[in-house]
Structure formats: C-alpha cells, structure tokens
Amino acid sequence: MKRLGLDPDLYIPADRHIPCAMMQRFVSDVGGRFNCLISEDIYSASNAVRLIPAGTEARGLYRTGTLKNGQGRLFLAITELRTPEPGRLVIPMVDSQAVGALGENGVAGWIDNHWLERIGNTLLLGTVQDFAAAASGSSPGKDRNTDYTENTRAATAEMAKTLLENSINIPPTMYLNQGDVIGLVTGRTLIFQTSTDCA
C-alpha cells in the first residue's frame, strides 16, 4: 500500500469523470482535433476547492480509420485543458480519454455504415446484367442459340466484382452534434502545486 502524500485540496484523482459538451460537429471520416466545453466546476479530492472552473475547454485528437465495421464506439484522446481567461492555465492531460456518459470506454454517436455505397452499385450492376440477359432471350428475329450479350454481361459482372471489392470495406462514419455531452476521464492525478494555481 502506498500513500500519495498530496494535499487533498490541491489535486484531482485519476479516473475522475468530467462531463464535456462538444463545441463543434464531429465527423470521424478525417482525423484531427476536437474541442469540448466542461459545463460544471470540478473540485479537488477533498471537494473543498474548485480546481477546474466551468467553461474550461478540453482539447483532443482522433485518428481516422479506427472505427471498424460492427463497432459502435470510437476512441478519442484528450490532450489538454485550457481554463477560461483571465489567468488561463494550460493543463496537460496524460493517458486521458473521452468516454460515454456513464464512464464506458469510447464515445458513441450516430453511425453511418454506408450500406448504399457498399452494396448499392453492385446491386445496380447486377440488375443491369439481369435485364441484359432477359433482353437477349426475348429479342425477336434473333438466333436463339446465339448469345449476343455475352460480352456485355461478362464485362458488367467484372465491373460489379471490382466495385464490390473496392466498396465492401468502407469504414463506418460516426457523427456527434455540437452540444452533445461526452465524458472525460483523467488518466493520471492532476496536481496543483499551490493555491494560486487553482482557478
């Protein structure tokens, strides 16, 4: 067993859950940065001293391609907190991440699985191929022993196969709207050296 030896008025323990509202609309297609706004005061371990004021901005990063087919949650890393002016503090966040409203790992949002893009073109080409086959069998005055559409149908089938290979692995896209509330979890203890560091 190990004692932290810290003033409980001057630190926020690891694994503290902090609610945060998205400041912009979030779309996971392109990796980059995101910001959210902490909407309530965050107090020290003793609950006696306000260390992070409401209105503090949390900044984070995310990578594209991390959301896989069949998944419903996305990993978002939190990099820093910026308290409001005046006396702004920049607080580095190490090993911290965004979580769900109840603290579950990853963030949930509305997910577009791109079903139309993944299978729509293949279905369209398959339908065209079926119509071509039907037309070849019903054309009057044609030799019914000769397939005049064989090349067209073969080319269409090859196109459908190529489109399917290119589109079947399109990753899902997650959307979060401005104002949606997520959570932050402190990865390590946040230590404020003196009372003048407190917001």
Image: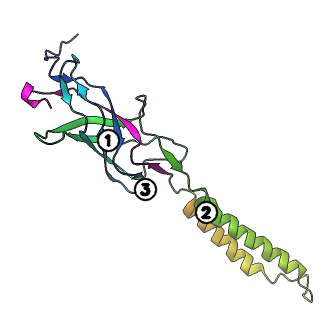
CB of mark 2 within 8 Å of CB of mark 3? no
Residue 20's place in the image compared with 33, above or below, is: above
Mark 3 crowdedness (10 Å alpha carbons): few <14, some 14-19, many ≥20: some
Q: Residue at x 41, y 37 (%)?
A: 106
Which of the 4 quarters of the picture holds residue 147? bottom right
Tell me the kind of residue under disc 3: Asp
- Which residue is under mark 1? 77
Question: How far apart are labels 2 and 1 at the CA level?
Answer: 33 Å
Q: Nearer the viewer, residue 176 or 129?
A: 176
What x and y, as percent, mark residue 124?
69, 68
CB of mark 2 within 8 Å of CB of mark 1? no
Q: Residue at x 18, y 28 (%)?
A: 51
| Region of the chain picked out in magenta, as a range | 171-199
- Which residue is under mark 2? 164
Q: Nearer the viewer, mark 2 or mark 3?
A: 3
- Which residue is under mark 3? 29
